[in-house]
Amino acid sequence: MLVFLYTFLLFHHLHTKAENTVCHLMGDPKYPLLSKDGDITIGAVLSIHSEETLPSFEFIKKPQRLFCSSVNVRDFRLAQIMIFAIEEINRSDSLLPNVSVGYRIYDTCGSRLSSMSATMALMNGHDISAEDRCNGQSPVHSIIGETESSTTVILARNTGPFKIPVISPSATCECLSNRKYYPSFFRTIASDYHQSRALAQIVKHFGWSWVGAVNSDNDYGNNGMAIFLKAAQEEGICVEYSVKFYRTESEKLKKVVDTIKRGTAKVIVVFLSHFEMGKLLDVLNNENITDLQVIGVEAWITAKSLITPNSFRVLGGSLGFAVRKINIEGFAEYIVKEFWDTAFPCSQKEGNSKFALNCSQFQDLLALKNYKEDVLEQSYSSNVYKAVYAVAHSLHIMLNCEGRSSCVEGVTIPPHKVVEALKNVHFTTKMGDYLWFDSTGAVVAQYEVINWQQDANGSIQFTPVGYYDASLPPDQRFMIKTDKIIWAGEQLEKPNSVCSESCPPGTRKAVQKGRPVCCYDCISCAEGEISNETDSINCKQCSGEYWSNAEKNNCVIKATEFLSFTEVMGIVLVFFSLFGAGLTLLVAILFYSKKDTPIVKANNSELSFLLLFSLTLCFLCSLTFIGRPTEWSCMLRHTAFGITFVLCISCVLGKTIVVLMAFKATLPGSNVMKWFGPAQQRFSVLAFTLIQVLICVLWLTLSPPLPHKNINYYKEKIILECSLGSTIGFCAVLGYIGLLAVLCFILAFLARTLPDNFNEAKFITFSMLIFCAVWITFIPSYISSPGKLTVAVEIFAILASSFGLLFCIFAPKCYIILCNPEQNTKQHMMGKYQSKPY
């Protein structure tokens, strides 16, 4: 029972104590560096100092305040422009009339620890309501800051659950665009999504396919570089190395510089904050690395703090994107005349503010009292100016100030209402800029392309040479004036940064095994293939009648091949053709002059003259095979050849039959010769020839031979030939000639032993033997010979068989007529001498 009573009394005591001390401030409060009371309060978290000295933590006495040093002029100017904008709004009669705007600007000293402390101070304040209870209301209506992405992530995450709007003038990390995690975050600068992709575009624009990459090892650098690497891959850009470091990692920085020294890329994309860039610049200077074309980002490309006597050796000719600078009218005069007397506490004569500072700790800020050279160079000043006005315009609507001489009083403005108002705010600043926030809380991306140049006096200038504007159509967003650029090493010629040189037309790229796609070998296109552009991935096959030229960069009409009259082989064949025809005519003239002699009269002189005539046609028909094939020449050459040779063989067959019949007629009681007299001989020759004519007519009617371009036999040239049309017709013509020749050979062979001093049958046997041998050999040669050699083989067969008939049948007779005329007598022809059988 006593235990229960004691427990009850203990809980009652604790409950009573809790009710009396709901809010209790632990430790020393953190006061703002610059502040002013007002009906509406805008907070700010800026790194006005960049270094922080921690006190001793020996736990033997209460820790002292953190000591800040090394003024960050950039953020100090942002604080000044914020106060300038607020004072301008307070003087305005149209924006928030009769409503005073105050501010609380905290200095984070470049420390995340101090940043957290400043954030808590802004969220909680120092006022406790009556009866020691918290008032439950944030003392600020919005917070401007921070300037770096990593610290802004911390700020936005802590204020997010309480829906306090945060507006950053320079935090560009794409990670902050996620409305799920940062629903109350806004920024008056574009996300790095656009800048990172613009970096890939500028690299692609100048034809650099082999680059190095360095980034800060924080949210800003890691997210920005990730977007760049993805965009670079889409653009076909290869990254030789991608390294990162943080400002406090000296050993990692040394490894980064070693990687840069070992690399072969002449272009390096540097996605660093200006703090890391300063560290990298110092080491590159010490290592004498001065031949790199640096591509930078808005965080450092226009940072005057990087300008040192030796920095141009490393960064001269650098290109990068910068936030567009806007001159804010009246700001320079405000800094000189009003700020130090009205806004800075240490300049006030009466220090009755409860946020009064120990001014001895801020003598470094007072040293900037007369410094104003960088006022117009601050790229982010207009972003702070826009952020203040965005808050003012949203509150202007919420307080029903529109069209009134004063705003509605007594209206409570919770922070989440300000967030909703900021999503819908849109206005035009006095500089002419139209401001609105997109669905991610950012403004439209607009950058200047800056080039580090040196003027005649040796001073470094950040020269604009182009722009990037995401509000324009895709094909108009990026513009750069190449002729105004000074490249690395103060060169006028653009550096070349590729893993492999471009493959010229006529070659294709072959990726080197185990290396990025930008590293390749140039391989010449195969025969019949071309590439007519630089860096072609594949060679294209020339189609149909086209073939690649010697350079393999263009398809040209294939060379045509046919047996022409002008080439050596054609000339030789023409010569033998005409020679054979001429020789045949000479034999005919000789026979005609000796037509009354027994040797000419023997074996039917009429058939002999008809044979000589047909042989002349055989020699001449070979000429139709030479020259470019035409429709008429194709039909003529085969039909002329078939008909003339049948006429020739028919005459020889007739002479053979005459020999046989002549000896049959000498037998007692035989009257065979009356059935094979001159009329019958003429009819037989005509009949045999007409059969061939009929075959040829059918061939030409049904499927005649026509000119044909053979592109299959040779890939690099076209064979102009005569297609056979009907293969059956061609075989029928040759087969009929072969049939007559075989029949003639058999009959001549049977008549070779007949008794006669000059038996013509044995010479016909020789001629038919040669004829058959030539044409039997012709068939495989014709089939296997390529191109114009096919025609040459056919002409050779015609000439060889014609010369064989001419020499075998008529040479012995000519020899007797010319050399042994004494044998050209009837007595000698009818002599008792017999030739020996074969």
Image (cartoon, rainbow, N blue to C red):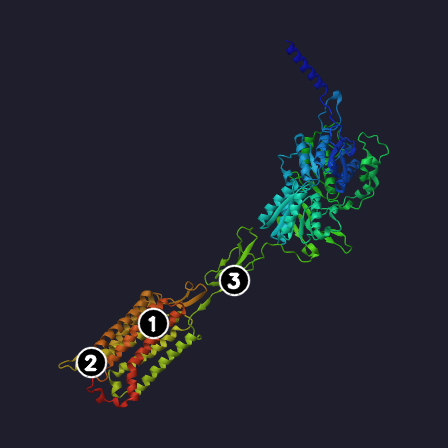
- Mark closest to the chain's N terminus, 3 or 1: 3
Counting from the top left corner in percent of width and height, residue 689 is at: 28, 74
Measure the alpha-carbon separation of dots 1 and 2.
Answer: 37 Å
Q: Nearer the viewer, residue 520 or 595?
A: 520
Disc 1 target residue? 639
The kind of residue tagged 1 is Thr
Disc 3 target residue? 552
Measure the alpha-carbon separation of dots 3 and 2.
Answer: 71 Å
Q: Residue furthest bottom?
A: 822
Residue at 75 percent across and 21 percent down: it is 130
Q: Residue furthest right?
A: 349
Confirm whether residue 423 shows in the render: no
Neighbour tally class for label 2: few under 14, some 14-19, many 20 plus, Cα within 10 Å: some
Rendering quarter of residue 30: top right
Residue at 58 percent across and 48 percent down: it is 233
Compared with 187, 717 (above or below) is below
Compared with 207, 55 (above or below) is above
Which corner quadrant holds the C terminus? bottom left
Q: Residue furthest left?
A: 669
Confirm whether residue 580 shows in the render: yes
Counting from the top left corner in percent of width and height, residue 238 is at: 59, 50
- Mark closest to the chain's N terminus, 1 or 2: 1
Q: Which mark is residue 374?
A: none
**Which dot, 3 or 1, sits closer to the camera?**
3
- Mark closest to the chain's N terminus, 3 or 2: 3
Q: Are marks 1 and 2 in contact (CB under 8 Å)?
A: no
Disc 2 target residue? 754
Q: Are marks 3 and 2 in contact (CB under 8 Å)?
A: no
Neighbour tally class for label 3: few under 14, some 14-19, many 20 plus, Cα within 10 Å: many
Rendering quarter of residue 648: bottom left
The kind of residue tagged 2 is Leu
